Amino acid sequence: MNTTVPTSVYAQRRARLAAQLGGNGIAIVPTAPERPRNRDSDFLYRHDSYFYYLTGFTEPNAWLVITGDGKSTLFCQPKDLEREIWDGYRLGPEAAVGALAVDGAFPVNELDAQMPRLLENRGTVWFPFAIHQGLEQRVAGWLNQVRARVRYGALCPEQQSDLCALLDEMRLVKDAHEQDVMRRAAAISARAHVRTMQACARMLREGRDVREFHLDAELMHEFRMGGSQYPAYSSIVAAGANACVLHYRADVAPVRAGELVLIDAGCELDGYASDITRTFPADGKFTGPQLALYDIVLASQEAAVAATRPGARFTDPHEAAVKVLAQGMLDVGLLDRAKVGSLEDVIEKRAYFPFYMHRTGHWLGMDVHDCGSYVEPGEVGQVSERKDPLSGEIIKNRPSRVLRPGMVLTIEPGIYVRPGDGVPEAFHNIGIRIEDDAIVTAQGCELITRGVPVRADEIEAVMRA
Ligand code: GLY
Ligand code: MN
Ligand code: MN
């Protein structure tokens, strides 16, 4: 259970949700299942983010039911001394009422018996669509039991609605408690990046055989020492050319002096993710070509940061970054003006795409790629069409989300240079990304991950230390 956020915060979130269900609505929110890994071993358990947002409760086998009149019912694992000897402490339904401030709690083995009763005489049943395998069928089974009682005067819900539509909007704007946890997660991850850069330079100075997994171990050490439960996603530790593989994992490749290391890693703390990328020279000194590209990526990130403020659109930081990246690619000869034309042409035809093929950010929260629509809800109907210059696909554009204080997003431009015809050799196999986490504030944005330096000279200095 999360003990750093008061129980009342979760109760308030449930009340806000209940007010949107309609007086006759009911919402069903399961937590995540336990998943087997291999014989007798499960994957490390991670609760469901929606369930956690409404309860702060991290045990498996639990369900939350909220009704439009504001009442919450929890189903959770019953107390069971034998199971607790093997698997650990369970809160149990009796204690749950006080500990989680719900109105009622039952053992989870009573779920199938209680749900038809709870669903009876409701109008709309809300649950997360397409998230929990088998949930749709389970709800259908409960509704069939209600229908069987129609002749006795029971009413069966006529509508089913996607609960994510409501919860995604709520989760998109982070409250003060969430921001506080996210700042702390970001600070731990920043320390982990500093530690890893320094360990890398030190091990190379000592003449050791440094591998990507050694650096992964340094990250994990700092995450756990900081109290993080686990990494928020699989850490990317990519030495040299591996940095050009976007979803590379920490593997066994040697980390060599003269090459760059790209690390994309962030811890999860009390259910909230952080997401940082730094690219640094393995031995602590950038070469000329590395620095030339690094400074372009950094300048593009600065432009994106400046574009991250309330009232701006989600796509504005991306467009600002692309402009600087494209100009930089022309300036250093990654793009040949004679072939691709002017800056405007490069942007219009997306000629930068071979070297920058991802977006500049995403929402960040409990999930590293957090929920929340990227389209402004009031403007979904304003559709324009354009043909993608690279794929030829017709793309439907809808107005991008307007940024508001409390939204949290990453800002992560990069340049990735695979060898190819006409690509200057000095840049071959250089992959650079710089990623920070930003909370939109009333004035602009707050970068919560800057406990790790980002300027090339500052990275070099910290690696000498
Ligand atoms: N680490 C995943 C991402 O940066 O989106
Ligand atoms: Mn990211
Ligand atoms: Mn990342």
Image (spheres, rainbow, N blue to C red):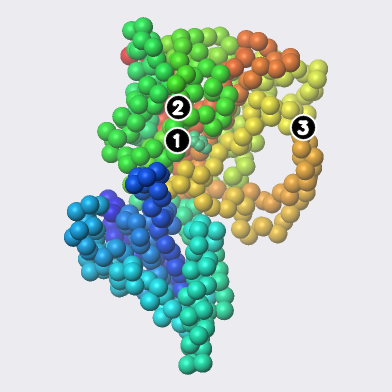
Q: Is residue 231 above or below residue 152?
A: above
Q: Residues within 10 Å of mark 3 (few under 14, many from 20)?
A: some
Residue 408 visible in the current orientation:
no
| Mark 1 CB lies closer than 8 A to ligand 1 | no
- The numbered mark, 2 or 3, whose residue comes first in the sequence reads 2
Rounded to the nearest angstrom, the CA distance separating label 3 from label 1 is 33 Å
Q: Residue at x 44, y 78 (%)?
A: 116
Given the image, on which type of amino acid does mark 2 rest?
Answer: Ala
Q: Residue at x 43, y 11 (%)?
A: 283
- The numbered mark, 1 or 2, whose residue comes first in the sequence reads 1
Q: Is residue 149 above or below residue 232?
A: below
Question: x%, y% of residue 193?
Answer: 39, 26
Q: Residue furthest bottom?
A: 152
Where residue 61 sits, quadrant-wise, is bottom left
Q: Quadrant of the C terminus?
A: top left
Q: Is residue 234 left or right of residue 130?
A: left
The residue indicated by pointer 3 is 349
Q: Nearer the viewer, mark 3 or mark 1?
A: 1
Question: x%, y% of residue 347?
Answer: 73, 31
Badge 2 marks a residue whose secondary structure is loop
Given the image, on which type of amino acid does mark 1 rest?
Answer: Ser
Res. 447 mark: none
Given the image, on which type of amino acid does mark 3 rest?
Answer: Lys
Rounded to the nearest angstrom, the CA distance separating label 1 from label 2 is 8 Å
Q: Residue at x 50, y 13 (%)?
A: 259
The residue indicated by pointer 2 is 250
The residue indicated by pointer 1 is 234
Q: Disc 1 vs disc 2: Cβ atoms closer than 8 Å?
A: yes
